[in-house]
């Protein structure tokens, strides 16, 4: 896994599916940081939107899960950098 992006509460890793070899972006969000920054509603909305919208212009959330410390989102990997730098 390599880091491909970083935000105030999250880090995005490039990951590969072991069985198919498909590349994905794994967004790992700190639950503690999200709570401290008051971003809980924003994070929940992000997940709801990504899980409900199908568009060629928005990444798909293929899977989401959490443990005691982190929320994990398995997203489409779009090579080419962040939207803010394009």
Image (tube, grey):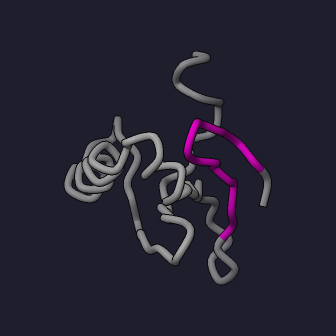
Residue drawn at the location 79% of the way across and 53% of the way down = 2
Tell me: 36 left or right of 78: left
Residue drawn at the location 47% of the way across and 47% of the way down = 36
Residue 44 percent across, percent down from the top left? 29, 54
Q: Quadrant of the C terminus?
A: top right
Residue 83 percent across, percent down from the top left? 52, 24
Task: Check the image and name the residue furthest to the left.
Answer: 52
Relative to the observer, which residue lies in front, 37 or 82?
A: 37
Task: Check the image and name the residue furthest to the right.
Answer: 2
Task: Check the image and name the residue furthest to the bottom.
Answer: 19
Q: In this view, does 83 lie above or below 40?
A: above
Residue drawn at the location 55% of the way across and 54% of the way down = 27
In the rendered image, residue 81 lying in the magenta stretch gets the answer no
Residue 65: quarter of image = bottom left
Residue 52: quarter of image = bottom left
Q: In this view, does 29 lie above or below 22?
A: above
Residue 60 percent across, percent down from the top left? 37, 54
In the rendered image, residue 4 lying in the magenta stretch gets the answer yes
Q: Give the residues drawn in magenta, as a range.
A: 3-16
- Chief secondary structure of the magenta span? strand
Residue 1 percent across, percent down from the top left? 78, 61
């Amino acid at each position: 896994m390599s880091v491909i992006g970083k935000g105030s509460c999250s880090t995005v890793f490039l990951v590969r599916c072991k069985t198919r070899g498909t590349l994905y972006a794994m967004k790992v969000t700190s639950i503690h940081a999200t709570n401290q920054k008051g971003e809980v509603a924003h994070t929940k909305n992000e997940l709801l939107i990504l899980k409900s919208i199908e568009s060629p212009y928005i990444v798909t959330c293929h899977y989401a899960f959490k443990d005691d410390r982190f929320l994990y989102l398995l997203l489409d990997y779009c090579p080419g950098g962040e939207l803010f730098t394009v």
